[in-house]
Amino acid sequence: MNKFIFALGFVFSPIAVNAGQVLPNLYASKFCEMRAAGLSKEDATTVAMQEAYISSGHAAKVTWNGKLIDSDVLQASIAVVKKCPDLAK
């Protein structure tokens, strides 16, 4: 479980969304695809956000690991860890 929390925190850290929502499964698919193609974590995050972000809607706020975050961002991070755990690091 600690490995999961570490990987989740590592994936989650660069994702910042002010308004709108992230589509978690699309984000994970694109992130993993870009990491497998050799992009850095930061570049893969940028590409995945461009693909998976929609400007409508607002995600619920949740507390994770003592921090208040958007639920869609947490779901996207969890989806990445499940889809490609070795590339999420």
Image (tube, rainbow, N blue to C red):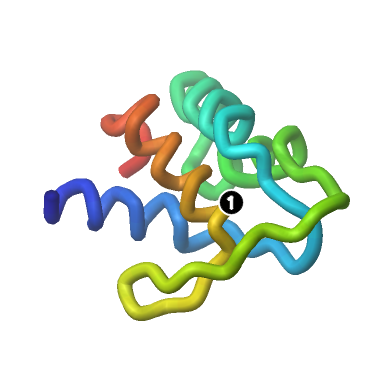
- Residue beneath the point at 24% across and 56% down: 6
Label 1 sits on residue: 72
Crowdedness of circle 1 by 10 Å Cα count: few (<14), some, many (20+)?
many
Picture coordinates of residue 19 (x, y %)?
A: 79, 64
Q: Which of 78 and 61 is in front in this view?
A: 61
Residue 16 placement: quadrant: bottom right
Picture coordinates of residue 25 (x, y %)?
A: 56, 30
- Residue beneath the point at 27% across and 31% down: 86
Picture coordinates of residue 1 (x, y %)?
A: 13, 49
Residue sticking out furthest to the front: 60
Query: Which quadrant of the figure contains the C terminus?
Result: top left
Picture coordinates of residue 43 (x, y %)?
A: 60, 43
- Residue beneath the point at 34% across and 31% down: 82
Residue 38 vertical position relative to residue 27 in the rendered view, above or below: above
Say what secondary structure mark 1 lies in. Answer: helix
The kind of residue tagged 1 is: Asp
Residue 7 as seen in the image, left or right of residue 32: left
- Residue beneath the point at 42% across and 50% down: 11
Residue 53 as seen in the image, left or right of residue 1: right
